């Protein structure tokens, strides 16, 4: 009786388990409806995101509505700096590719201009410390809600992800076309160009293969194993089998040769796949307003506050203020600067206020040591605390401005951070 | 009369068993070959802008003659059925198309003209045919393997020729295939990852294709031998004597 109960219990357990598994499998695809995820920038190490490539001045033409219709074009513009002190622990080849991230071809990348002049088609070679201005022109293709944004991939170093927005593409893509004029003068639709021809050839070659398989598989199959083992191989083939074999073998070779020649006649002008790498010069340097050096930095773990001291010398002819700190697509604005308020159209994350002490402007010729302090939950939310990582250095861009509005972007790229763990923090691996 | 009925029933049962064996083999080979192909020649098979004149005709045939050779070793030596190459390539082709249709087109909305797979079926038929005609795997390796490499590009040229038509776009010259890869975004696949002809290998015929095809055929011969023995080893059969059962 006990055995019976055990078996019954096991059966119930298996059934319940199977029901859970089945339910899980059915619900899993639906979960994407409730948890739309971005491009996974947080999975990259903080020191990599803060010290390699920094995007700034990013703007999307579809803001603030973040809605476009299928077929609409929109732009993403901005600048990107390759940090001057590139971490030695991250390879640098300079071979890069400006990209627009979106999960699949839900938008078409119509064109990318870098420094106004260059059209980005092949990979380019960039320089450390260089600032590059990009303009990405895209076209909405597939309805849905998609995370989108600029991105620079670098050989050996990986992808660097810029600020992202969620774009809603409305309408239907039924009837969507993507016409292009070739150098031979005809207009083609990239959505389905060559598709019918490809499917016809696929079906034709498949039909021949299926005919070949049907011919042989229509004969008894497993029985052949025994006949071969019994040494009766010759009984398995008839003269017709050999004729069919010749027909298929020679016929296939002739068919392929003929099809290739006909195709050559149909497409007399073709070119190879194109491949090159070329250099892009960075933008000319911005006017020098300051000279600066970061002297120390700490991160207060319980207080979630990054602080550092920076010695600044005003080398311009107007008073200068520190307006902003930007790192890993998180912006911190100095509220003491008039008009320096958060704009909802910024695609970056709002890190909160940046406290600068002393808050008074730095006058021409004057040298001051500023204490910059940013308390923000975003250090943890964005996984930008480095005391768990192998490299405890931070970087980012400081934006200084004079009274005429002239801006100087100053890169911090190699400053070590001393964590302050506080009494309540325990150990760990 | 009873004997006739019994024989008919036996034949019917044998055919059903044949179908079960063939379908099972088809699915097993499909999955194994498909995984092998994706791991070794995946990008060359996925994307229209990887189907160049140098690397594609080298990588794809060399990596893809493996399962046909192994299947031939089993199906020819054990069954005398000249279908090993066609059977495995049909399985691969079916698996690839399911992948491209459901995943690439249906799920992520790539146009099929960007992601369609190459066909290996004409070469496979020729490889099977050579094996049956010669009844010798060494000769099949030498002749069939070489033909396998040579036939690959012309077997696929009818499909890919339209994508080599030139286009001028924002002042740059590119092929239609280049333009498709540019416009239809592969988010995490930057252009520098493409392994395609770099224009440094002019040869006898003025292009790289002849050298690639020859090299491909040469390596396919070697791969054929290696994988024939894989198939032979894993397809080893031992018949147990009745008295021991």
Image (tube, coloured by chain):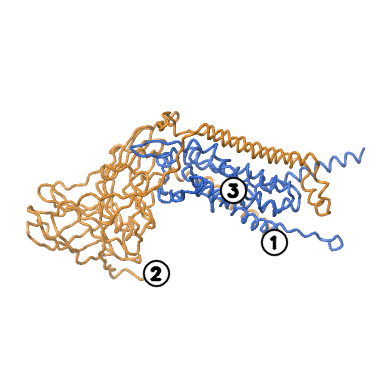
Chain colours: A orange, B blue
Tell which subunit mark 1 falls on: A
Q: Residues within 10 Å of mark 2 (few under 14, many from 20)?
A: few
On whether disc 1 and disc 2 are found on a single subunit, the reply is: yes
On the picture, is A102 further left or further right than B11?
left
Q: Quick one: which residue is furthest to the right in this view?
A: B1
Residue B145 screen position, x and y as percent: 63, 50
Determine which residue is flagged by label 1: A2
Residue A269 screen position, x and y as percent: 46, 35
Q: How many marks?
A: 3
| Picture residue at 73% right of the left edge, 51% below the top | B76
Determine which residue is flagged by label 2: A429
Q: Secondary structure at mark 1?
A: helix
On the picture, is A100 further left or further right than B211?
left
Determine which residue is flagged by label 3: B149
Residue A9 seen from this side: no
On whether disc 3 and disc 1 are found on a single subunit, the reply is: no
């Amino acid at each position: 009786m006990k055995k019976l109960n055990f078996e019954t219990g096991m059966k119930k357990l298996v059934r319940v388990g199977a029901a859970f598994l089945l339910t899980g499998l059915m619900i899993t695809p639906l979960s994407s409806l409730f948890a739309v995820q971005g491009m996974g920038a947080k999975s990259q190490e903080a020191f990599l995101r803060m010290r390699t490539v920094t995007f700034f001045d990013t703007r999307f033409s579809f803001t603030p509505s973040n809605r476009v219709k299928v077929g609409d074009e929109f732009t993403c513009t901005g600048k990107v700096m390759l940090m001057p002190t590139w971490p030695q622990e991250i390879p640098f080849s300079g071979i890069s590719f400006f990209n627009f991230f979106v999960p699949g071809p839900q938008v078409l990348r119509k064109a990318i201009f870098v420094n106004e002049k260059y059209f980005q088609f092949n990979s380019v070679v960039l320089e450390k410390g260089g600032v590059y201005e990009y303009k990405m022109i895209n076209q909405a293709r597939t309805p849905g809600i998609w995370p989108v944004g600029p991105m620079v991939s670098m050989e050996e170093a990986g992808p660097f992800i810029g600020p992202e927005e969620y774009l809603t593409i409305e309408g239907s893509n039924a009837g969507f076309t993507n016409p292009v004029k070739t150098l031979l003068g005809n207009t083609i639709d990239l959505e389905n160009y060559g598709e019918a021809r490809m499917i016809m050839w696929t079906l034709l070659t498949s039909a021949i293969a299926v005919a070949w398989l049907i011919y042989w598989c229509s004969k008894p199959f497993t029985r052949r194993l025994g006949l071969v083992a019994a040494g009766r191989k010759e009984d398995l083939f008839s003269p017709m089998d050999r004729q069919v074999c010749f027909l298929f073998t020679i016929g296939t070779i002739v068919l392929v040769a003929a099809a290739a020649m006909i195709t050559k006649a149909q497409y007399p002008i073709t070119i190879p796949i194109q491949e090159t790498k070329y250099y892009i010069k960075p933008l000319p340097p911005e006017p020098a307003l300051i000279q600066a050096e970061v002297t120390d930095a700490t991160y207060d773990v319980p207080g979630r506050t990054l602080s550092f001291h920076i010695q600044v010398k005003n080398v311009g002819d107007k008073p200068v203020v520190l307006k902003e700190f930007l790192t890993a697509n998180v912006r911190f604005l100095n509220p003491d600067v008039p008009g320096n308020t958060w704009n909802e159209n910024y695609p970056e994350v709002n890190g909160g206020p940046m406290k600068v002490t002393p808050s008074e402007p730095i006058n021409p010729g004057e040298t001051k040591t500023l204490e910059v302090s940013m308390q923000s939950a975003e250090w943890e939310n964005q996984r930008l605390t480095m005391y768990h990582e192998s490299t405890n250095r931070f970087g980012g861009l400081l934006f200084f401005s004079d009274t005429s509005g002239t801006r100087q972007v100053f890169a911090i790229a190699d400053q070590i951070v001393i964590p302050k763990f506080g009494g309540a923090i325990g150990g760990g691996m | 009369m009873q004997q006739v009925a019994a024989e008919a029933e036996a034949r019917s049962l044998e055919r059903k068993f044949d179908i079960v064996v063939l379908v099972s083999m088809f699915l097993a080979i499909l999955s194994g070959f498909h995984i092998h192909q994706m791991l070794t020649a995946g990008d060359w098979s996925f994307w229209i802008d990887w189907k160049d004149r140098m690397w594609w005709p080298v990588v794809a045939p060399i990596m893809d003659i493996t399962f046909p050779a192994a299947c031939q070793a089993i199906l020819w030596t054990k069954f005398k059925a000249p279908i090993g190459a066609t059977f495995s390539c049909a399985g691969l082709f079916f698996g690839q198309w399911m992948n491209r249709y459901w995943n690439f087109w249906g799920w992520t909305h790539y146009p099929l003209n960007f992601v369609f797979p190459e066909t290996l079926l004409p070469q496979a038929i020729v490889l099977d045919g050579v094996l049956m005609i010669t009844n010798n795997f060494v000769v099949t390796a030498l002749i069939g393997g070489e033909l396998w490499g040579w036939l690959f590009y012309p077997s696929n040229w009818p499909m890919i020729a339209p994508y080599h038509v030139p286009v001028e776009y924002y002042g740059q010259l590119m092929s239609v295939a280049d333009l498709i890869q540019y416009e239809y975004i592969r988010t995490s696949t930057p252009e520098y990852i493409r392994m395609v002809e770099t224009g440094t290998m002019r040869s006898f015929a003025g292009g790289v294709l002849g050298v690639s095809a020859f090299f491909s055929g040469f390596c396919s011969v070697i791969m054929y031998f290696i994988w024939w023995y894989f198939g032979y080893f894993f397809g080893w059969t031992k018949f147990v004597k009745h008295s021991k059962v």
